[in-house]
Image (cartoon, coloured by chain):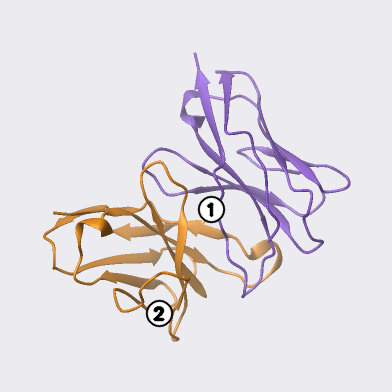
Amino acid sequence: GAVVSQHPSWVICKSGTSVKIECRSLDFQATTMFWYRQFPKQSLMLMATSNEGSKATYEQGVEKDKFLINHASLTLSTLTVTSAHPEDSSFYICSARAGTSGRTDTQYFGPGTRLTVL
Amino acid sequence: DAKTTQPPSMDCAEGRAANLPCNHSTISGNEYVYWYRQIHSQGPQYIIHGLKNNETNEMASLIITEDRKSSTLILPHATLRDTAVYYCIAWATGTASKLTFGTGTRLQVTL
């Protein structure tokens, strides 16, 4: 199957600082990448969708100025949590999709990044 | 995308087949049935998907009823490493579609 990596796997930061998380599709080109967030004992919640070279589309309730997404190439997307606060502590997971329809349109997920804001 | 219903939890003895059911009675003709699983503290792992025919790969088999209102994921010989939350998702693939997760089934494989 296709491989998606994330870096870092975990990060601890102080309140008020910014944190960048990278997501890479290692063996395929991703036309679309997605960012999810998962709080303890809850399911994954989609935060935003990004297409290479265009602005991300954010889900309702997600602050676009706080969660900056850049999808500069077909293999790399970054999520920057700006001015992080303890309530932003969560498990952030990216996903990448290669195709646009039918059987090739499967999303593959990265291993996740655990963010802890002190 | 159609809503899916799964039992919240299931147990399975190691070495036995695990049969995970999913109801998707409002599924549309263009929606595939996708299965993912999430092992604790990891990202979801793609397992299998299908439209209307039964599918099999190295991980599992997917049985979809003829009316497509329900499906069953079969892990033929469950191991302890199969303990995870399994998500069944009815998803209309395409550029505007979003893969959204419900609460899934927590499968516990025991000795």
Q: Mark 1 sits on what residue?
A: A1
Q: Secondary structure at mark 2?
A: strand
Q: Point out which mark residue A73 bears.
A: 2
Q: Residues within 10 Å of mark 1 (few under 14, many from 20)?
A: few
Q: What is the spatial separation of the Cα atoms under label 1 and label 2, in whole angstroms? A: 21 Å
Tell me, by letter, which chain the rendering colours orange: A
Quadrant of the rendered structure where residue A107 is?
A: bottom right
Q: Nearer the viewer, mark 1 or mark 2?
A: 2
Q: Who's the residue at 49% across and 13% down the image?
A: B111
| Closest to the observer, B14 or A38 | A38
Q: Who's the residue at 20% across and 62% down the image?
A: A85
Q: Who's the residue at 65% across and 37% down the image?
A: B60
In the rendered image of this protein, which colour is used for chain B? Answer: purple
Q: Is the residue A40 above or below the residue B111 in the image?
A: below
Q: Is the residue A17 above or below the residue B14 in the image?
A: below
Q: Earlier in the sequence, mark 1 or mark 2?
A: 1
Q: Position of residue A56 (x, y in %)?
A: 44, 79
The answer to whether mark 1 and mark 2 are in CB contact below 8 A is no
